Image (cartoon, rainbow, N blue to C red):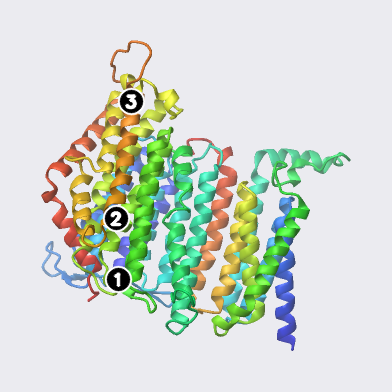
Amino acid sequence: MLIELLSISAAALLTISGVLILMAEDWRASIGLLAAQYVGAFTLTALEWPLGMAITRLVAGWIAGAVLGMAMLSLPEASSIQNDIESAPPPPTAQPRRYHLSPGDAPHPIFLVLSAALVGLAVISQVPSLTNWIPGLKPVHAWGGLILVGLGLLKMGFHSQPLHVILGLLLFFSGFELLYAALSVAPLAAALSAAVTLTISLTGAYLLLAPHMEANE
Amino acid sequence: MTALVIWSIFPGAVAFILYSLRRWAQAVYWTAVIAALLLAWLAWQFPIGEPIPIRLWTVLPALRIQATQLLFGGRFTLDNSMRPALVLIYASIAFWLGGSGAARTHRLFAPLGLGIAALFTAALASETLPSSAFLFALAAFISVPLVSAPGEPTRRGALRFLSYLVSGVCLIIFADGLITALPSGSGADPTTGIPASILILALGFSLTLAVVPFHTWAPMLAEESNPYAAAFVFFLLPLGISFLALEVLIRYSLPGLAPAMFVVVRYAGVLMTLAGGVGAAFERHLGRILGFAAIAQIGMMLLALSLNDQLGRATPLIGVYFAQMAPQGLGLALWGLALRILGYYEPDLDFRSLQGVAYRLPVASAVLLLANLSLAGLPLLASFPINVALWSALIQKSQSAVLLSLVGNLGLFAAALRTLAVMLQSSEPNRWRISEDRIQITLLVAGVVMLTLAGIFPQAYLPTMANLGIIFAGPTP
């Protein structure tokens, strides 16, 4: 009973955090939500895998978020604006630009909610067949994995800014990891998938910072 | 000492050290080239798993390179059948790194190139498909800084490349998990009878190999980044992924995999050759033409893979796939280098901006055209003999595939003619002058000599390359 409650809460956390990451324009909120999403992914994985292996997911995910956060803080414009904003209240008419991930090209929130709802409907329709198909895959895991894959694809498709794309990739990869956890419990695969999560974030950090580096660096 | 330590962990460590020392660009460049050459030579000379006498001092015991290494519960095996692939990987890396100085790539090129080779080797050594795919994904991530240089804005091509690659790798791993976990034939599509896991596997390979319609990142990448670095990625990543595909088709012989898969691979190859050739013929940007040519070459690679239509075992025709790599690598490297030199002097590589460029940069322009014509399969140039061998073998299996791939190659030929016309077009009278520096001229001329010699004397290297392929794809001892 407790395990069921835990897994349903984790799946709900994954869904809410995934939808909010899709909609968030504030990079701090996005990274905070990413951390919450990895808590949900860890909880679901821990129900399938030994705790020691499952915790690598959580640690790798949190480090990935930290790497992206540090990269955002290291952006020259963001740092300078941040100091100004912290010393003075934001103007009432518009949000300070540093809080936004995209320069005004993000789709309308209603459109994003509708897209996420469509993904949710598609996932609901596919969960029974997937659980019939893969022995040992529980509906909650199938839901969690598929919803993250779908939301990750939406995030990647709607944006062309590096941080958005990297967040989408992390969502997608996290969903894939959840589905794959039901198929394999190999320590090497767990170690390599943690390495891939970290490398996605390092690549993202590089792509964020590269335009501000010296050409001969 | 294990083979994995020598050909993967050691170059990985060298790459990391060179990355830390990137301030000394020349030293890093030469060290990386020498390390890659040394590793290729070691793979060529020293058998794995057999005693190697050290002749310096008779008392010294014979050295033995162990084939298998255990890591995190996984087995990594590099046996004698893998040595041809090791020679090929490290010789290719040395060749590409050698040209990177003249191509004015950024300082990360040498350490990252060596790191990519180390990861590729580990991926080949891994005995499980998921680990191999994860390691290929890591190699692809490392290649992102090559195509998105420091100081330049992040472009859409690099992001799209990254997205497609991660998605493709995830699908390949997921499909492998399904194939391993499920009984054969379960989850089959009722209309086609093909298991869904095989369809997922095919989709994964399509995403990673830029099979049409997932090919859009290639022209974008070639347009937006250093053409030499882009050509390096176009050569090495499909090569690595095709090794993985070869292992799936021949070594593992996964349950549920039908011989019809080879027909699918063949038509994917035809589609790519056709799309690449037609795209190149109608393109007006030299960088994007390179991207389309790379797509056509991946198509030719898939066509060569499809010749070996025996599940679970290699036939001698697999030699064609292996032999193709040398002329393709040479052609792409020369094309990338020549284009980079043109781009260095004329930043806009659009046709409008390049009118009359042949008068100012004659060597780079001529080499670019020759590389283009070589990849199109012009007689007396490097790709011609192997293309003829490919088409001769393919015509016995599918005449339409040969015809359509010839059309694709004709598209590349048309692109070369259009480029030539633009390069010589000028409204004012021009005088020929050589603006390239000596190192650039030396490398370009050496490349053209190799391109021509490889086309005139194919018997000098093609049988060796084909035999290497047969050894690599043969049954593991």
> Viewer-proximal residue, B363 or B131?
B363
Q: Which chain carries label 3?
A: B
**Residue indicated by mark 2:** B400
Lower position in the chain sequence, tag 1 or tag 2: 1
Task: Judge depth for marks 1 and 3 and give the one in front.
Answer: 3
Whichever of callouts 3 and 2 sits on the residue coming sooner in the sequence is 2
Q: Which of marks 1 and 3 is nearer the N terminus?
A: 1
**Mark 3 surroundings within 10 Å by alpha-carbon count, few (fewer than 14), some (14 through 19), many (20 or more):** some
User: SS class of the residue under badge 1?
Assistant: helix
CA separation in Å, label 3 and label 2: 31 Å
Q: Identify residue for label 1.
A: B250
Return the chain for callout 1: B
Residue B412 on image: x %, y %: 32, 40
A160 left or right of B436? right
Q: Residue furthest right?
A: A92
Tell me which residue sits at (73%, 55%) in the image: A112
Is residue B110 in view from this perspective? Answer: no
> Which sits in the foreground, B125 or B287?
B287
The quarter holding residue B429 reads top left
Disc 1 crowd rating (10 Å Cα; few below 14, some 14-19, many 20+) is: many
In the visual, does B58 lie left or right of B86?
left
Element under disc 3: helix
Query: Could you tell me which chain the residue with mark 2 belongs to?
Result: B
Q: What residue type is labelled 3?
A: Ala
* Quarter of the image where one finds residue B244: bottom left
> What distance separates the C-alpha of mark 1 from that of mark 2?
25 Å
Q: Which of marks 1 and 2 is in front?
A: 2
What kind of residue is marked 1? Answer: Ile
